[in-house]
Image: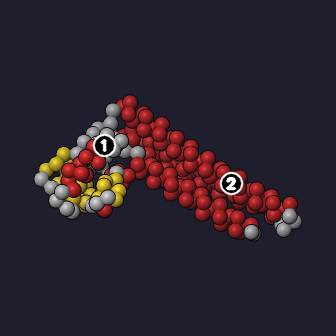
Amino acid sequence: MSIADIKKTAEQKMARSVEALKTELQKVRTGRAHPGILDQVHIDYYGSMVPISQVANVSLLDARTISVQPWEKGMGAKIEKAIRESDLGLNPSAQGDLLRVPMPPLTEERRKELSKVVRHEGEDAKVAVRNIRRDANEHAKKLLKDKEIGEDEERRSLDEVQKLTDRTIAEIDRLVTAKEAEIMAV
């Protein structure tokens, strides 16, 4: 493995950590409706557990209401029950075949809790990035020990990995700050 391979691998892993954080932050519910909130809710569909998006059309009616339109007649009650029993705290209401899922407003206490969750997710992402940096640095030191590279190359590699780490952590901080502002502004 060369220095370029080490940096490329570290960069890819750090990018995946940032993407994983973005995914986790999307699950944190603000007062606004977002169809992705229901992605983690699964429903029994002829013996298989599938996401709601595979048995119904999920869209927004307005900024605070999600609409769920089942593709089959008998699925409405099952979908309604699955949403109600999920840990999302949502209370859907049926209007014929259409399910309306209003987003309840957040209390100040709940906003503070969600803010802590967001900071915790950000901290987990930072830990993952630091672990990637550590692994990359260990690889570079091993190459130096095996005399495959010189000390200058190793030092340059460590500096470049540190700069990559700093950029990635700054991106994580930016995402966390933006999500906290979104939670508190609602």
Who's the residue at 51% across and 44% down the image? 121
Q: Which quadrant is home to the C terminus?
A: top left
Who's the residue at 28% across and 60% down the image? 46
Disc 1 target residue? 85
Q: Is residue 13 above or below residue 124?
A: below
Who's the residue at 50% across and 55% down the image? 20
Who's the residue at 59% across and 48% down the image? 126
The image quarter containing residue 115 is top left
Disc 1 residue type? Answer: Glu
9 left or right, relative to 68: right
Could one spot residue 29 in this view of the protein? yes
Q: Which mark is residue 61?
A: none
Disc 2 target residue? 133
Q: Residue 53 location in percent, x, y?
A: 31, 59
Q: Residue 177 location in percent, x, y?
A: 48, 44
Q: Is residue 57 above or below residue 110?
A: below
